[in-house]
Structures are given as C-alpha cells and as structure tokens.
Amino acid sequence: MTERCVLGLDVGTSGARAVLYSLDGQPIAESHHNYPLETPHPGMAEQDPEKVWAAVARAVSDVARSKPSGASVEALGVSTIFHTLLATDAWGETVTRSITWADVRARRQAEQLRKQIDPTSLYRRTGCPLHPMYLPGKVRWLRDEAPDQFARVACFGSIKDEVLARLTGRRVVDRSVASASGLYNVNDNDWDAAILETIGIRSDRLPDIVEPTDRVGGLSSSAANALGLSEGTPVIAGAGDGVLSSLGAGAIAPGEMTVMIGTSGATRLAAPRPVLDDRGRTWCYYLAKGCWIAGAAINNGGLAGHWVRDNLLPGPGPSTDDFDFATLEAQAKQAGVGSGGVIFLPFFTGERSPFWNASARGLIVGLAAHHGPPHVARSVLEGVCFRMRSIVEALDQAAGPTREYRATGGFTRSAFWLQMLCDVVGKAMILPTVEQASAFGAAGLAMLGIGAATSLADVAKLVEVRPGPEPNLDNHAIYDRIYELYLDVYWANQKSFEAIAALQDDLG
C-alpha cells in the first residue's frame, strides 16, 4: 500500500534539513547537512549559494534513499531564512553571495536612509524597522560599495528564489519572505514604490511574488537527478523559517507565543492582520492563508554559546552540532545563579529587537580575580536569556496578551538552558513534540498546496504538546535584579558601541 508523504526542506543559517512526513504529521525520514556562515570582514556574514545547494541536494537525496519503499513523495515545501540578499544577472547567474540576516555591513547606509526618509512611516508600510539587516540598506550598500556588481544585477533576490529556481527553473519569491525584506508594503500587498525609488531600483528588478501555498512548478530533470526524486514532483513555495516555526509549533491561535532559540532567537504571535508596535520594537511578517506573525528577534542565540564554547572554552575537538554544548554546560553548572555577578552582553553580530542597534558589541562585565571559566560559561547562557526576556516583554506589550509560551529551537535539547530561560522570563513553558518546526511548517504548506489540508488550523492540529518547566521563583527574583543591571550596562555603553564599531570598520 502506498503511503502519501510530503517533504519539508528547511534551508537555515547553519545547514539544510530535509524531513519526510506522512500526511498525519509523523516524521518518516530526516537528514541534515551543514554549510558555513562566512565572516571575512567585520560586519559581514555571507554564505556561498553553491555550498547551500550542495547541502540541499545531499539532505534531500539522503531522505529519498532512506524512505520506505511504499512512501510516495507528493510535494516538497520550502523554508528558508529571512532577510537575505542574493543578486543575479540576466542569465540567472549569481552576482553576489547570499548576504544573510547576520550581516550588518550596511550600517552606514541604513543611517543615511534614516536621514532621507521617515523611518516610522517606512515601518508602518513595511512592518520592518530601518536596520542594516533588511534589504534597503543592503541594496544601497551594493550600489555604493560595489557599483560594478550593482550594474550587472537583473534581480535583487534572496536565497529563497535561488533555491526555487534551482528546483523548478522558475525564479519567484513567496509573499512571506517578501514581507520580511523591508521592500514590501503590507497594506498594498506589493513591493513598496517609495522605498524602491529611494534606494534606486525598480520593481521589475525584484522577483515576482507568489503565495506561500502556490505550486511554483515541478522538479526539473536536473534537480530531480540531484535530489533523487521524481521529475515533476510539485514544489510548493513555502515561507520564511521564522513564521514556519510558529506553524510547526502549532502556535497560530491568539495568545500562543513561540519562544525560540536557535542560531538566533525570536518570539512570535499570530494575528489575522499586520500588527505593529507604536515604539517600533517588533516586526510583522506574512505566514500564509491570511495569517500574519508579529514578532521580535535577536541575532545572537546559540551563535553566542557556540562562539564561547569554541573560542573561550574549547572542548576536545571541533563540534559538528551547533547545540552540542556539553563542554559549556559542564562549566556553567559549576557556577551559581547569576554567574557570581558576571554579566555577558552577547552582541557578537549587533542587535535586532527591541532596540535595533547594529553597532552593539559583546561585553563581559564584572570580572574579578575569583572568577573562572564556569562564571563566563554560565553568564553567556544567562545573557542570551536576558536578551530573550527583552523581546518576550516587548512582543507581549505590542501584540498580546500572551496566554501560553511554547519553547522551540535547538536550545530545548538542553534541560539546563530551558529551565534558565523559564527562570529569567518567569513564565512556564509548553513544549511542542515536533522537533524540526520550520521543516514541519514547510511540509504543512505543501499539504495545503496539494489539497491534503484545507487550513492552517488543520496543520496546527497535527502538533502535540507536553508540559515544560515551571519557573523557580527564587531564581527569578535574583534574575530580576540582574536584568536591571544588564539594561543599565547596555544603555551606559551606547557611545562606546558606536566608537568600537567604527574602529572595527577602520581596522578591518
């Protein structure tokens, strides 16, 4: 008997993951292959699209080889990271590498744009604050700093349209990824003419927009050969990994907040229309089927722990898993709550929500002679939790009230870190049983695209949840005190952040 299945492809920050699901949401086969996030100069964070595609092909072909003989792959849904710029020429060849969300090279261009336009008006139109992560600054940077490349560009696209083009031969972008670009008008549901005119490009140099549940096409013969799937297999456009993580957590009802720490970190709440913050602390992106996701995000989640583990507290050898934190945790558990008064501000790649400071840099504050590796190890995990608290509170104020908190992302594999976040935030956590939320979300949109599901609620019902940790109120009281100090240190260093970021630019 043939079992109908869909494949969720998640093209993330650190690698590509392919998961095959039955139509009742059960995982059947899975594979993951890494690729590097390359940082050749201060502020830069790029990826080689050839390495990304090679990882995609390996992950999908692994799943194709390992699927049961009776499993039929009915469709493939695609999740990719948000906020990338990957420009191509008139022949579809890449002009740039994939400039990722972690790249803040366009800091100066974003500041120039802030003087040319009303950033509040831009935020209200696009749902995206004016920050170098978004495409207005990145496109302007390319025009200013690489004019020869800029002149060759036929399409200012993203890793999403590049992957879809390699799968089907058709270069389009889904409305979800478009809505997170800073170039898309959430009120008009089209590219925003005013910001395009300001940065000097026309809408015909952007990909055509399709709905996340649309069939882009079938797998081309070359893609089918590389992936080990049948030619013509339907490819559903999918959405951005962040909003798909909410769907994969089953959190699309009012008041269900996802609290995620992966390479970065984010909080999200679903809404039937764009929801913005009067203070500009949050963003709002499209998911599918009329559902919008309001959220807030940090740049440095697992990335910060990864850096400390590999550079300050190296283990016996390099790890292949971003959440293999055995060395870090073993040290951190030796320090008490509060890390002996050591406070870590984990701004390795600047800051996104809630204050949108691309010049913010990492700080370790409070070191004394009696401190050692355990205090530093624990302080970086606590520092990420403080960052998460800042966006939990901002999103709750802007788009709440929140009635439950669903923890997702790689950090949930660490009971120690999960409990710490619970104590810092002071909220009980619920744990979805889906391990790969973005891949599941992409598979869910594939189900919708082929008519195997009729609504987002149908997909969300496939997600089971279980109780997570409750906050330790004694620890929460200690963290309340440290959180205030953390904020004081942050605000006291604004001028220093600017000066250090400028110095790093000059020194290279």
Image: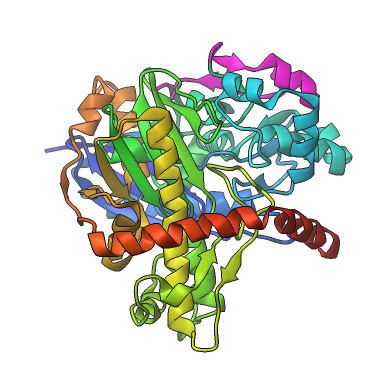
Q: Which residue does the image show at 50% across and 81% down from the upper left? A: 313
Question: To which quarter of the image does residue 173 belong?
Answer: top right
Q: Which residue does the image show at 69% across and 52% down from the upper left? A: 359
- Residue 201 among magenta residues: yes
Q: Percent from the top left, x then y, of residue 268?
A: 39, 37
Q: Percent from the top left, x then y, of residue 284?
A: 48, 28
Q: As displayed, is residue 352 above or below residue 158?
A: below
Q: Which residues are magenta?
A: 187-214
Q: Percent from the top left, x then y, of residue 401?
A: 31, 31
Question: To which quarter of the image does residue 144 belong?
Answer: top right
- Residue 342 among magenta residues: no
Quadrant showing the N terminus: top left
* Horizontal relation, residue 248 to residue 117: left or right: left
Q: Can residue 470 be spotted in the picture?
A: yes
Q: Nearer the viewer, residue 96 or 376?
A: 376
* Horizontal relation, residue 255 to residue 293: left or right: left
Q: Nearer the viewer, residue 248 or 276?
A: 276
Q: Which residue does the image show at 68% across and 41% down from the upper left? A: 132
